[in-house]
Amino acid sequence: MDANEIQRLIRNLIRKGRVIDVDFDSKPPKCRVAVGEADDDGLQTNWIPWVSLAAGETREWLPLSKGEQVVLFGPMGDFAQGVAVRGFFSDEFPAPDHSPNTHTRTYGDGARISYDYATHALTADLPADATVRIVAPGAVTVQTQAATVKADDVTLDAKQTTCTGGLLVKGPFAFESGMTGKGGKDGATMKIDGGADFSRDVIAAGVSVSNHPHQAQGADALTSKPIASGA
């Protein structure tokens, strides 16, 4: 092996390059990398794999982008056995943040997730038509001092919904399929500050409010107490 060949192999051990194509359907997914000032200038690799953060029982999928800068490793100077290592910024793909105290990730649609460990603040900004779905067949527990949900509509789809503390409704309160309840251990009763309008009869302690009889006691006698239905 002459000196020129040795120098070529040494140069090809580690090179900087740029992704020119990605095959997401191959197993494993692979990419092609160009080394040079332009995609068609200088060396272009065949299809080679790229390094992921985890690729065992725990795996992470974060696809490469065309134009992304990579470091090209060629074992024994042979790019046929090469692998691309991503992870440094470029003019085309600049750093998404410049704070020393944040972990930030941005996506191609403009979504941005950032955690500021100086202020202990986690922020997720998603596009206007984005959705969030969490599937946990066992249980979901959210523990905090205060929670605020702002939405045009909120639906709780459950066989039973239990509120263990007080419930304050500041807007109109509507219900369907009836309502039942009872006073607490201290004998608390329902109190309404305002009027009530019922479209049908109301039964209070067995007495019809709109249609109850009285005991006849003479023309000038006081009216008796209402008589309960069926009495």
Image (cartoon, rainbow, N blue to C red):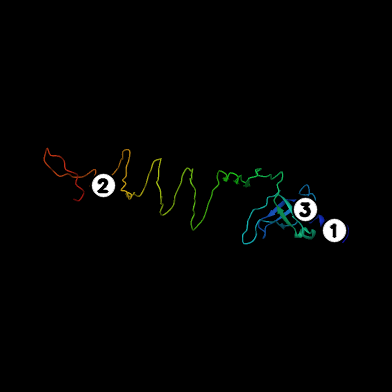
Q: Residue at x 79, y 60 (%)?
A: 76
Q: In the image, which disc is placed on residue 121?
A: none
**Left or right of 55 in this view: 35:** right
Q: Is residue 5 above or below residue 90?
A: below
Q: In the image, which disc is placed on residue 203?
A: 2
Report crowding for label 1: few under 14, some 14 to 19, many 20 or more residues within 10 A (C-alpha): few
Mark 2 touches mark 3? (CB < 8 Å) = no
Q: Is residue 180 visible?
A: no
Give the farthest residue toward the right. Answer: 2
Q: Amino acid at mark 2?
A: Ile
Quote the CA–CA distance across marks 3 and 1.
16 Å
Q: Secondary structure at mark 2?
A: strand
Image quadrant where one finds the N terminus: bottom right
**Left or right of 27 in this view: 46:** right
To which residue does mark 3 refer? 15
Q: Amino acid at mark 1?
A: Ile
Q: Residue at x 74, y 52 (%)?
A: 71
Q: Secondary structure at mark 3?
A: strand
